[in-house]
Structures are given as C-alpha cells and as structure tokens.
Image (cartoon, grey):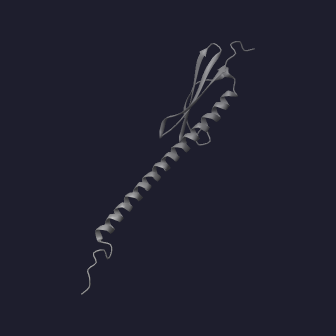
Amino acid sequence: MRPQNREAGFTLLSVMLAVMLLSVGVLGVVRTQSLVLSAHTAAATRTGALEIARAYLEDLRSRDPGTLQTEAPVQVDETGVVNTQGRYTRSVQVQSVSSSLVRVTVTVTTPTNKNGVSLMTMAFVNPNPT
C-alpha cells in the first residue's frame, strides 16, 4: 500500500486563484498604460496649441499695434494655417487698456480642450502717428 501524500501537486483551486491574481495584475497594467497614453495625447495636443498661439502672437507683435483688431475664431491646422478641416481653433482678442496701450490675447482651443491655451502681450500704440 502506498502512503498518501496530500501535497503531491497543485489543486484546481490554487491554479484558479493564481490565474485570477495574474489577470487582476495584468488588467491594472493595461489600465495604467491607457491612462499614460491619454495623458501623453493631451500633452501633445496642448503643446501643439501652445506653439500655434506663440507663433501667431509673434506675428502680431511684428505688426503696427495701431492696426491690431479682434479676430473671430478660425479653424487652423497643426502649423497654424487657416484650414476649415483644422483641429485647432484660434481667436484674437484686442482690448484697449489706455489711450496708448492695448492688450493682445491669442487663444487656441481644441475639441477636447475648450479652455485651450492663451498667451497675452501688451503693445504700445502711438496716439499721434506721424
């Protein structure tokens, strides 16, 4: 007669428990990876919007401050060129602070980020152009 050994191998219950623990760990890693990917995409979109706003603000700075006007929102592509299929929306707000000072704000938004990014600068306007 053979002696009975109760610890001869794995039971079905222990294998199922190990598979369940492994699957919970894998699901946690997958969820973390998806969150990292969405955060990376959001950061890349904000960086693109910031670059568009910066480039257009530099363009506005090169103009005569007395000719600056508020611009309605327009669709632009990743390079800042007006494009009706663009995924960014750029707008310009020009506000008079005093008789010789204006505030220029460029705002770029995306469908996923309605607040977008805004850059602001001040420009001196010559009240007596020669």
Q: Is residue 104 above or below residue 100?
A: below
In the rendered image, residue 36, in percent from the top left (x then y), is placed at 49, 49
Is 56 left, or right, of 6 in this rendering?
right
Nearer-the-camera pick, 116 or 4: 4
In the displayed orientation, state which residue is furthest to the bottom. 1
**Quadrant where the image shows the N terminus:** bottom left
In the displayed orientation, state which residue is furthest to the left. 1
Residue at x 67% of width, y 22% of height = 65
Q: Please identify the quarter of the rendering in which residue 93 is found.
A: top right
**Quadrant where the image shows the C terminus:** top right
Is residue 83 among what the camera can see?
no
Is 114 left, or right, of 61 in this rendering?
left
Q: Please identify the quarter of the rendering in which residue 63 is found.
A: top right
Is 56 left, or right, of 74 in this rendering?
right
Q: Is residue 111 above or below residue 120?
A: below
In the rendered image, residue 122, in percent from the top left (x then y), is placed at 63, 22
Q: Is residue 34 above or below residue 111?
A: below
Residue at x 63% of width, y 34% of height = 54
In the rendered image, residue 7, in percent from the top left (x then y), is placed at 30, 74
Nearer-the-camera pick, 73 or 42: 42
